[in-house]
Amino acid sequence: MALVPSRSLTSDVGRTLSGPPAGPHKARPTCATVGRVIITLAIALALAAIDTRAAASRIISIIPATTEMLFAMGAGDRLIAAGTYDHYPPEVERLPRVGALIDPNIERILALRPDLVVMYSTQTELKSQLDRAKIPFYSYTHKGLPDIPETIRSLGARVGVEAAANALAAQIERQLADIRSRVARRPRPKTLLVFGRERGSLRNIDASGGLGFLHDMLETAGGADVLGDIRRQSVTMTTEMVLSRAPDVIIELQYGRSDPTAETDLRVWDALASVPAVRNRRVYLLQGDEFVVPGPRIVLATERFARTLHPEAW
């Protein structure tokens, strides 16, 4: 939306730049005067732009993490649509869906006439369409644990709830520091964090590597990531690799729909009886979307890791 200075401002500037009414004794404006007026106009336009950016009231968020952030900072009532996989908090279920990372419904997004779209930074086609339609957007990048409070601060400032967002971010940082402090002097068991494998077998094991918020949460919770030396967010493992890494603890994550048979399925690990985690019965299943959504619930997820690794600390 174009920014139009007020009539009084433009007319005042116009009079100053053109000088006062002609007369035999009237002085022309100096360069310094003109410069001050130009600076004043630039500041006024900048402030108007800030006000416009902060007034987002028809927001679409297609990212589960940012949708949770917006609700947690008190801006959930400004959402007019959400992504396919956005399910928390429960209030989000009332919103229409507009696709996700690989299948955004661009036609529907444009038809809803949002004044801000929160999207992944990699969605270049959606970004181009929004640019053409002159619809503002906020680009989200998936990073590590310390970046989550910073994203909350940045997003809150963008939608005009900066104070609430700053308070939320600071609270998350304090709570994570409390967990870190509670487990600081305890032994750090070598931990394998698994977030996927072929059902009923130990094939195609997907585990957390040494990058990303899952790795960061595990380390904050007092574990030593057994794949921490592999600088990737995801590592596909064979059973031979599990044997060679010899984790003290294995944690499997399950998200989405709850599966009552998941605990039984953990018995497939019994095939690796020489692995310390299996031998000492330290193979655990943790269920919940909070483990895979890097939003405000990371505190809950990190504490659940810590309670699993160091139950004696609680």
Image (cartoon, rainbow, N blue to C red):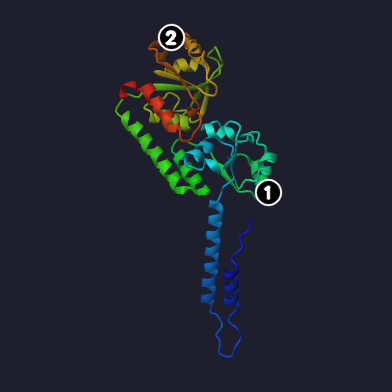
Is 13 displayed left or right of 125 in the figure? left
The residue sitting at 38% across, 26% down in the picture is 306
The foreground one among 311 and 211 is: 311
Q: Is residue 156 among the parts visible in the rendering?
A: yes
Q: Using a 10 Å C-alpha cutoff, classify the residue at mark 1 as few (fewer than 14 neighbours), some (14 to 19) or many (20 or more).
A: few
Picture quadrant where residue 309 is located: top left
The foreground one among 241 and 275 is: 275
The foreground one among 35 and 287 is: 287
According to the picture, the residue beneath numbered tag 2 turns out to be 273
According to the picture, the residue beneath numbered tag 1 turns out to be 133
The spot of residue 149 in percent (x, y) is 44, 40
Amino acid type, label 1: Ala
The residue sitting at 54% across, 12% down in the picture is 201
Q: Using a 10 Å C-alpha cutoff, classify the residue at mark 2 as few (fewer than 14 neighbours), some (14 to 19) or many (20 or more).
A: few
The CA span between labels 1 and 2 is 60 Å
Q: Is residue 165 above or below residue 39?
A: above
The reply to whether dot 1 and dot 2 touch (C-beta < 8 Å) is: no
